Structures are given as C-alpha cells and as structure tokens.
C-alpha cells in the first residue's frame, strides 16, 4: 500500500522545530529523511547497528519481519525456491525481472564461460597453509582477483561493472571448491561447461581424477535451492559492508572480498558452522534442557546458534523451506535418523514452546537446518560459510551495481556520539604520572 505523499515529521528540541520530509516506500514502513538534519539543526542521530536507519533506497529485496515474508524483486522466496532455479534468480536479482527463454540462455552461457580461473591464481592458493579456513582463502583470492582481471575494475564503466559481476558469479564456486580441495590435499578440479551451476560446484568439490563423478540430482537440486534461499537479504551486515566499501569507488573484487570477511562472523554467515558445532556439542536429546537453560542465563554468553534474527520477528521463511529440504534430502539419502537432525528438531520444538524464546520472538533462522543438509552431502563444517558466500555473491553484486548507479549515494561516512576526552594539551613524558 502506497503511503500518503508529502507527509512531514517534526523534530522539536528546546522549543525549536524542524520539519523533516518523509519518503514513501512501495511496501514497508515510511522513512523520515534526515539528510539535512545536521546542516539545519546541528544535531546527529544515534543508531548503532542501524536498527532504525535506512542506509539507501533499493529495488532488489524486501523483508517484512512481522509477516515472515521475503521477496526478491517482488517474488516470494517460497515460489522461487519451488519453481525457479539459481541462475534464473541471479538474473532476476541483477536485472530486475525474470528472463525470457533467450535472455536466460544467453545469461547461462555467459556465466558458464567465465567459470575458469586465471591459471596463475592456482599459485595464490598454494601460498596458504593447508589448514587455512576456506573463508580465509576466499577473502584473499577474491581480493586478489583485482590483480588478475584489470579489464573489469573501472567502476565508472558500466560494461566493466557488468563483466566483473558475471566473473564473480561464475568464479566464486570454483574459488570455494578449490579452497576446499587445497585444504584436504586433493588436486583442483576444473569446472565443466555441460553441468548446471550447482552440479558443477558439487563436482568441483567432490570429484577426484581417478574416477568418474556422477552428480546426484537430488543433491544438486537441494544445493541449487539452498543457493536461491541465500542469494540476497537486503541491507544485512555483509551487503552493507560491500556497499560501504564500494562507496569509496573501490574496485568490485575488493568490495566482495570485504563482504566475504564480514559474512564470516558467527552472528552472520558463520552461524551455520557454529550451529552444527553446537548440535554436536549438545550430543543427545537429553542434554537439550541444559543448553536451553544456558541460552536463557543472562550471565552466560552462550546463544542458541541458528536462532533469532534482527528483522524476522515471526519466522524466517527461508528456514521453513530449509527444514523441508533437510527432511527430503536426509530422507532420500537414508539419513532420516541422523542424530543431529533429531536433536535439531527437538531443540526447535522445545525452544518454540518456551516463554523466553516466545517473548523475545526468537525463531530458527536459515542457518538452523542448512548445516545438517551440508553435512549429509559430505561437506565439512568449515565449508558451510563458503557455500553461503558463493550464494550471496549475486546479492552483493546486485546491490553494489545498484549503489554505483544511484545518484543519491555518497561515500558512506557515519558520524559519532563522541564520549572521549575533550581537548587537552600534550604533556611531556617526565611530567606524566
Ligand atoms: N539465543 C539466545 N538468546 C538470544 C538469541 C539466541 N540465538 N538471539 C537473541 N537473543 C536474545 C538476546 O540475548 C537479547 O536478550 P535481551 O533483550 O534480554 O538482552 C534479545 O534476544 C535480542 O537480541 P539482540 O542481540 O539484541 O538482537 P540482534 O537483532 O542484535 O541480533 C542475531 C540478531 C541474529 C545476531 C542474534 O539473534 C544471534 O546472535 N543469533 C545467533 C546467531 C545466528 O544464528 N545468526 C544467523 C542470523 S540469520 C543468517 C545471517 O544473517 O547470516
């Protein structure tokens, strides 16, 4: 529903008032435009964590946290997860509309033809310790891409921006798979153009030169769906990091490397690894109450990983699809009695009936079930967040491209509430106490 136009908010400080314009979204809450506030009223606003601050306008993704709704370019995530596939969703996010058949074919061709890495990049991988976390390798290799693809780092050239976008969507699976192969001491597997995006990724992770690798269609469909569910999520921490890095005019590879670094944290993309490690630590259904009690204890820093979300206060629609996928994949692979899945389901049941979690509106998020699926597929926990990074690359790039083309964007430069020492004079060392 369109909000009423030309509404204004009034800010009054010590009897003096300022009118602030309001901006109407297509859906969602109205926004008070405070851009001129400092110039006019000489005050800043204070909002660490951006809980009430829109950092940009965007046409890409919309979340209604109360309804538990997630839309990519207006399309509900459940419909896309069911009927679409990852590369079609990439086109949708990047260009704004679903492709027709010719557009999709052209896009798939372009992505497929960019999946190989510059051969010299291999040596970059080899510089890492074998026990490096694949996310560390990815931050390094993606950042280093700006030293390999000089013809797509001019952010002012729309064609170069387009080429950089396609390159990153195409090459991130190869980079993530090679980071994994390197960590287990197996040879790198080159991409194959006759496979779809998810199958190609699975093959690069699990094939070995000594035998033919046959992609399991159930697993590749599940991987494709997981990628779709993770593809974008409006102005989350890593996306905001990409936008902030990009706002200075930094090249796209450097910006995506910054996004990967931010995603790594356990409060964000690192939660899928942390969640599986937590389920392992719980170990049996009998121990769940002990961990629930710890999560409720204010003096214990422990949190239920895979629970809670800054925006979703009803349920995370991605978690619903993910739970269904977990049931399907584990059922089909004969893992339905997987002890971790039993613990996860029981933990979810107990937490959803507990007043603490109900009052704080804490529900399972996308990371709660994804790790169980990844584990059933044969991935080690360290690969969970890299898969998230591969999937989110299209979202980061779409948001970065939108920002570069947005005339209202400036270099990101927050202000602060300074609470340090006021001006004081330098004291020579002999005179200091
Ligand atoms: N377990 C126990 N208590 C929790 C949890 C949890 N997982 N999450 C939030 N709370 C409590 C928190 O202690 C606080 O209580 P109080 O008001 O008494 O201080 C209240 O709920 C609000 O928490 P908050 O930290 O102010 O909320 P936030 O919006 O800043 O944090 C979050 C959101 C996702 C970082 C947080 O819920 C969390 O740490 N969850 C676990 C990590 C996780 O699963 N992250 C994945 C998020 S979804 C995918 C992604 O974004 O990458």
Image (cartoon, grey):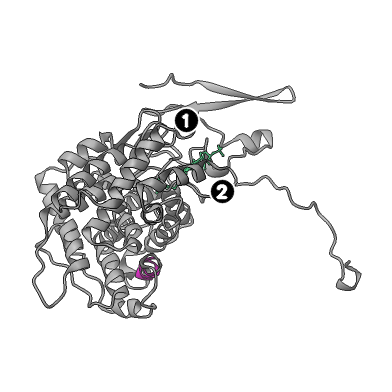
Q: Quadrant location of residue 322? A: top left
* Residue pictured at 43% horizontal, 52% vertical: 238
User: Between 228 and 306, which is closer to the camera in this rendering?
Assistant: 306
Q: How many marks?
A: 2
How far is disc 1 from disc 2 in space, using C-alphas?
A: 18 Å
Badge 2 crowding class, 10 Å Cα cut-off, few under 14, some 14 to 19, many 20 or more, is few
Badge 1 crowding class, 10 Å Cα cut-off, few under 14, some 14 to 19, many 20 or more, is few
Horizontally, is 77 left or right of 358 in the view?
Answer: left
User: Between 201 and 98, which is closer to the camera in this rendering?
Assistant: 201
Residue 15 horizontal/vertical position (percent): 73, 22
Asked if residue 115 can be seen in this view, the reply is yes
Q: Which mark is residue 300?
A: 2
Residue 353 horizontal/vertical position (percent): 40, 31
In the image, residue 362 sits, relative to residue 21, either above or below, namely below
* Residue pictured at 60% horizontal, 46% vertical: 299
User: Between 230 and 58, which is closer to the camera in this rendering?
Assistant: 230
Q: Is mark 2 within 8 Å of ligand 1?
A: no
Name the residue tied to disc 1: 355
Placement of the C terminus among the 4 image quadrants:
bottom right
* Residue pictured at 26% horizontal, 74% vertical: 118
Residue 155 horizontal/vertical position (percent): 38, 58
User: Between 384 and 153, which is closer to the camera in this rendering?
Assistant: 384
Which stretch did the figure color magenta? 137-145
Is residue 143 inside the magenta stretch? yes
Tag 2 secondary structure: loop
Asked if residue 231 can be seen in this view, the reply is no
């Amino acid at each position: 529903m369109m909000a009423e136009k030309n509404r204004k908010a009034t800010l009054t400080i010590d009897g003096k008032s300022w009118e602030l314009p309001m901006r109407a979204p297509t859906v969602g809450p109205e926004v008070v435009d405070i851009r001129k506030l400092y110039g006019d009223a000489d005050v800043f606003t204070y909002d660490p964590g951006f809980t009430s601050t829109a950092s940009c306008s965007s046409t890409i993704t919309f979340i209604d946290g109360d309804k538990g709704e997630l839309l990519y370019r207006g399309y509900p995530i459940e419909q896309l997860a069911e009927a679409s596939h990852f590369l079609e969703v990439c086109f949708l996010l990047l260009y704004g509309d679903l492709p027709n058949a010719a557009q999709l074919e052209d896009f798939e061709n372009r992505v497929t033809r960019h999946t190989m890495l510059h051969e010299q990049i291999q040596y970059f991988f080899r510089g890492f310790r074998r026990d490096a976390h694949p996310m560390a390798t990815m931050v390094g290799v993606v950042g280093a891409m700006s030293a390999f693809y000089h013809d797509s780092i001019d952010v002012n050239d729309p064609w170069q921006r387009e080429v950089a976008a396609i390159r990153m969507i195409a090459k991130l699976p190869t980079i993530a798979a090679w980071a994994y192969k390197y960590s287990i001491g197996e040879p790198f597997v080159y991409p194959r153009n006759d496979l779809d995006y998810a199958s190609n990724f699975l093959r690069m992770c699990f094939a070995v030169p000594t035998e033919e690798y046959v992609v399991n269609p159930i697993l590749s469909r599940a991987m494709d769906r997981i990628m779709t569910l993770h593809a974008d999520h409006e102005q989350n921490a890593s996306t905001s990091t990409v936008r902030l890095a990009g706002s200075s005019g930094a090249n796209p590879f450097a910006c995506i490397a910054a996004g990967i670094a931010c995603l790594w944290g356990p409060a964000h993309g690192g939660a899928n690894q942390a969640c599986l490690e937590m389920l392992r630590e719980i170990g049996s259904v009998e121990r769940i109450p002990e961990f629930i009690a710890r999560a409720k204890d204010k003096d214990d820093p422990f949190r239920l990983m895979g629970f809670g979300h800054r925006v979703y206060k009803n349920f995370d629609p991605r978690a619903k699809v993910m739970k269904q996928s977990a049931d399907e994949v584990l059922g089909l692979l004969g893992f339905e009695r997987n002890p971790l899945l039993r613990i996860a389901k029981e933990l979810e049941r107990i937490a959803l009936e507990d007043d603490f979690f109900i009052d704080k509106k804490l529900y399972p998020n996308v990371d709660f079930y994804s790790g169980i699926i990844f584990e059933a597929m044969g991935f080690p926990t360290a690969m969970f967040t890299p898969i998230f990074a591969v999937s989110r690359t299209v979202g980061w790039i779409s948001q970065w491209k939108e920002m570069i083309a947005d005339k209202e964007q400036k270099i990101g430069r927050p202000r602060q509430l300074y609470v340090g020492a006021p001006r004081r004079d330098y004291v020579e060392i002999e005179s200091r106490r």
